[in-house]
Every structure is written in structure tokens, then in C-alpha cells.
Amino acid sequence: MAEFNNVHSVAEMPEGDDAKRSFHHRMFLEPQEKKRSMKALVVKQAKKTCSCTPAKVKDYVFSFFPVLQWLPKYKLREYLLGDIMSGVIVGVLLVPQSIAYSLLAGQEPIYGLYTSFFASIIYFIFGTSRHISVGIFGVICLMVGQVVDREIQRAGYDLGPAALSVLTDNAAYVNTTISPVNQTSQKLLCDKSCYAITVGATMTFIAGVYQVAMGFFQVGFVSVYLSDSLLSGFVTGASFTIVTSQAKYLLGLDIPRSSGIGSLIATWINIFRNIHKTNICDLITSFLCFLVLIPTKELNEHFKSRLKAPIPVELVVIVAATLASHFGKLKETYGSSVAGHIPTGFLPPRPPDWNLIPNVALDAIPIAIIGFAITVSLSEMFAKKHGYSVKANQEMYAIGFCNIIPSFFHCFITSAALAKTLVKESTGCRTQMSGMVTSLVILLVLLVIAPLFYSLQKCVLAVITIVNLRGALRKFKDLPKMWHLSRVDTVIWLVTMAASALISTEIGLLVGVCFSMLCVIFRTQRPEAPLLGWVAESETYESLSAYKNLQTKPGIVVFRFEAPLYYINKECFKSTLYKQTGVNPVWVKAAKKKAAKRMLREKEVDSGGNQTSISMDFVSEPLGFHTIVIDCCAVQFLDTAGIRTLKEVCKDYREIDVQVLLAQCNPSVRSSLIRGEFFKEGEDHLLFHSVHQAVDFALGAQGHSGTNASK
């Protein structure tokens, strides 16, 4: 049995007040027995996992399909009206956004409607959040579109018509291992739009598999590395890329989409090179749409507490623009780019292209992580606000299946979206039934209304996409407040935003994660390490640099290190301790040795002179304190380097007659000290449960030694 004492045994008890001060009751702490048999733990976990009882099967089924839990308890009179109203309003808003974001993902408009339809139904079955709206999210659509464009270029679909003709005519004579020729020769079987959704669906399937796997292996902790400031900076940086990708539609330019590192700068260079080809009709239409959308959106936000439902201005703009384009014959007269034919109904299911998986598997990783991080954070935020609980693990399953199942129905990647979730909450949503109502609204469009959008100009869709980025771009207004709250978070936001915009979205996310982790390391590398003073008439010790009117005990220095002690900051610990105490024991020992040598030399010249006595006085010069108490309350852990550093510090100070006491060590630190053989028989290194106990002991021990010396 291990024993932990917070004092050592005193061989000779002092008398009087010193006895009261130095005597402490011995404390015995018996550690809990730990089962260290890995085999026993594995067997126990296996039995628990593999056991199968009717009750366990029922619990598993109900937890995997939350709809079976809440739907039988659905209060029709209380919930139905709010769910119908919010579902219809979100559906009306989602229709134009689904069509607009399809352009961002490099897809035909119909596929955006498919994606929103299936995502709403599947989340209705698997989701645990009552309020979040799962569907198309702009940043993820951008990342999908970049991969789609890259694969289309690899396959040769972006070659000019003449080149396509030559490649097709000579396909039989060219080596069949050349990818562009193979894909081009099959153009009659799958055209560019068909290949684009094949790439998008394949990546959607892989991202969904990743998300379900993360839920199965319970690795949702990955999302903790995506802090709020990092995600906000990433979304804002990606918003600049989205605006850039949509700018060509505003101007009616037919230029290729740039991808890869520095695509934002390359795109703007390409735009300015072709600015003279601007389609005036598209430019005027874009300007008019901005004039309508932005003020109306602002009014919606300003009067959202008074409005029962937001004004569906996007739908109004789409209907008006479609009618103007159709009756004004803008495509035929001015060459405006339009959405084109949008079929009704559903295409037959089709599996992903397994041959494309090696090409897109790596690209799907950041998309999967961002998708589930945003979904889980939004679901937990709204659950906390409305007083119910969600299961983060089940949310990963839900968003994973929202990608896996729709990938067989010509859909691309989805996640929760904040803007639509806020609308859903503010319009009376009570349960997941609202999502089913939204899917019915989209189904009506798919079956009846979709072909009517044939003449809709693409510049209108681009305007809708850009206007919906206002929230992300407004984050710049919050920078002063963010800087006041946390400068580190502000720098993380700026670095992630700049990297996401100027380099690429994927690399920007990676840069943000690495930079935020480096910030954590740097903050532990040079932490705060103040001297502490005593709060009168209490047992509390606080920082002398932070508070006034604190007292210090004579001959005792109390030092607090506010970080784990490990290999990165061990030198900082030593240097800060030496600086705060004003005594570097290594230098003191060196000075004593030098003085001793000098004294010996002087003895040879003059055996009893004044200089010898001066040297002796220098050697025995007092330091001003006899004890250092290290407050370890903020030291979460020690590694081998940290243990070695504490040993060195204690040894060095002991050699100049200064004792070092440790106080408020947590069990992990105590265990590390014991395993590292920090305590050796005959040494007076003591552990105390509080700084006050350590200081009392030091005062008592010093008083006892002073009494013995006087005797």
C-alpha cells in the first residue's frame, strides 16, 4: 500500500509556539486499486459489447433510429402548426438556394434540389436535433466544386470542340491508357454534367463513410481541434473564394474556373483580362438583384422579432427574373447564360463510380470533418438553448447517412447550415417533423415547377449565393471585440481566413489547425509564473503582480507555475524561477567556489589579514530567504524532463541551504514524482495539500533550527 504524507516525521519536537506551528497531523491517503490487466479489460468490454438481450436490441434500435422515440410522443395540436409553418418557409427559401449552390458545386440545378430533398428526409429519421436544417452549405459546395472541376479537366471534358473531335475520331488509334481520350471517347454515354455529378456523388459517398466510421469508432474528438475562431475564419476565407468564383456569372464572362493553390488571385487576374467581354445584360440584372435582395434581407433581420415569417425575397426575385428573361428573350437577344432545362421527377438510382474513389478519397477527408463539426456544434448549441439533449455520436451517424444514401440518387455533400437553422427556429419549429414538411415543398418543385426555371439567368443565382455570405463577411466588424476578448483567437482567425482565401480552402483549414495547436504550445512554453503573497486573515495566496495589499512571510518565497512542466518549457521554468527569486543557485555556487579559491590564495600571502575576513563574509552572505514553496496547482502533468528539472532545482537550491517544498500537486503529478523516484530516503522534499501548510511548516522548521542554534 502506498502512503502519502504531507509532512515528514520530526525527530525532536520543538517547544512552545514553534511546536504548534511545526506540528501537523500525518495524513494517510490510500490510492484506489487500479486494474492494470489489459486482458481483463478487453474481455469485459467484449462481453459488454457482444451480449445480446431483447432489451439491449430494443435500446440499440431506438437509439439508432431516434424517430421511433419521438414520433409516437408527437403532440399533434401543440407541435403541428409550428412545424408546418417553419417547414414551408425553409422549403421556400431552400429552393432558390439549392439551385444557386448547384452552380457553386459545379452541378446542374436539378441535383441541388435532389440533395436538399433527400437530406431533409434522412435527417428526419436519424437526427436527434429538433431545430437544425440539414441541406446545402456554401463552403462545402465550394470544396466539392473545386474537386469536380479538377476531375473534369483530368477527364478532358474542358477541351475545346475541335480538340474533342480530333480525340474522338482518333480514339481507336491512341493508347487506351490515356485518361482524357478514354473519357472523351465515352462522351455519348456520359456528358460533362453527367460526369460532374458522378464525381460529386462518389465524393459524397466517401465523405459519408468517413463520418459514419468516425461515429462508430467514436472519434468525434477530432472536432475539438476546430475551435470557434478557426471555423469562423475558415468560413470567412472560403466566402472570399465563393465570391470570386461567382464574379464571372455577375459579369456574364465565359472563363474557366481556376483551382488549386492561389486560385483566388488567378481568377481575378483572369476576370480583369476578360473584363472587356462583360455581358451588359447580365451586369444590369445582377445590379438590380443586389438592389432588391440586400435591403430586403436587412429589413428581415431588423424586424425579425415583429415578422411572423421572413419575406421570401429570393423566391420573388427568381420568379420575377425568370419571367423577365423568358418574355424579354434575354438569352436569344443578349446572349445571357441561363439555367437551361431542369427535368421533372427523379433519375434512376446509380451507384458511385468505384474507380474514382482513389482520386477523391483524400479530398473527402476535410469535407467530412467540416461537415460533422458544423452539424454537431449547431445541434448542441440549439439543444442547449431549448433545454433538450442531443447525442453527438448519433449526429455523426445522421450526417453520414445523409451523404451515403443520397449518393446513390445523384446528390452531393450536405451538412447543417446556420442561416436556415436560424430561420427554422424563429418561425416556430418544434420537432424534426419540420424537415419532412420542407422535403414535401421541394418534392412539389421537383415534380411540377422545376421546368419553369429554364430561362432563369445564372447571374441571378450568383447574386443569391453572394448575398447569403453577408453573415460570414460581417465577421470583420467583430474583430475589435474579438481582439479585446482574446488576441490569440483573433490571430488564429486572421491566419485561417487569409490561408483559406489566398492559398486554398483545404490547405487553409490545415494551416488553421496547425497554427491553433502551435498557439496552445507557445502559451504553455512561456506561461505566467508569478510570486504569491498571503491574503491577510485567510489561508489564501494570490499573485503579487495582480493584487495589492498582499503580505509575504519572512524568509519564504512562494512561486506558482501556471502550465504543465514538460520538455518544451523546462528551461522557461528554471529561468523564470531564478529571475523571480533573484537567486540563480548555479551562479551562487560558482561565486562561492571562486571566493573560496581566492581566500586560499590570500591565506598564502597573509594568514590573518582583513581581506581574508572579507572573503569569508562574502562566502557566507545570506540570500534573503531559506525556503521556496512551489505552488503546483496549475501543473496538470509532468514528463521525464519535468521530473528531472524539479530534481535539479531542488538539488541546486539545497546546496546553497535553501529548501524547496511542493504544494497542491494533483494525483497525476504525485504519481509521476513517485515513479520518477523524486523522493529519496533521507531527503526533506515534502508535498503539501496547500500553500498555507507548506508556509507554516517552513516557518516552524526555521524557528526550530533557530532555537537549536541558540542552545
Image (spheres, rainbow, N blue to C red):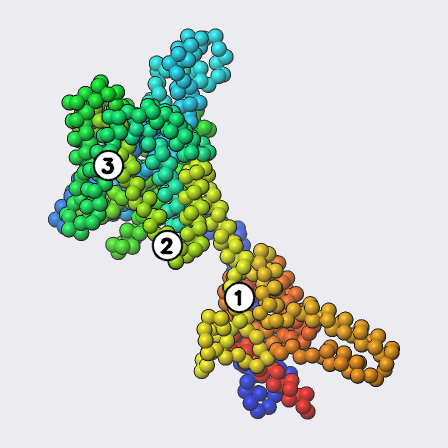
Q: Between disc 1 and disc 2, whose residue precedes?
A: 2
In the displayed structure, 379 sits above or below 687; it is: above
Q: Position of residue 698 (x, y in %)?
A: 58, 79
Q: Quadrant of residue 400 in the image?
A: top left
- Seen from the viewer's position, the closer of residues 422 and 186 is 422
The residue beneath circle 2 is 480
The quadrant the C terminus occupies is bottom right
Q: For mark 2, does the 10 Å Cα neighbourhood hold few (<14), some (14 to 19), or many (20 or more) residues?
A: few
- Seen from the viewer's position, the closer of residues 416 and 394 is 416
Q: Which mark is residue 529?
A: 1
* Residue displayed at 76% across by 71% down: 593
Image side of residue 589 versus residue 111, left or right: right
User: Contact (CB < 8 A) between labels 1 and 2?
Assistant: no
**Extreme left residue here?**
77
- Seen from the viewer's position, the closer of residues 457 and 364 is 457
Q: For mark 3, does the 10 Å Cα neighbourhood hold few (<14), some (14 to 19), or many (20 or more) residues?
A: some
The residue beneath circle 3 is 290
In the displayed structure, 343 sits above or below 404; it is: above
Q: CA distance from mark 1 to mark 2?
A: 28 Å
Q: Which mark is residue 439?
A: none
In the displayed structure, 5 sits above or below 198; it is: below
Which of the two marks, 1 or 3, is nearer to us in this view? 3
Q: For mark 1, does the 10 Å Cα neighbourhood hold few (<14), some (14 to 19), or many (20 or more) residues?
A: some
Q: Quadrant of residue 86 in the image?
A: top left
Q: Between disc 1 and disc 3, whose residue precedes?
A: 3
Q: CA distance from mark 1 to mark 3?
A: 55 Å
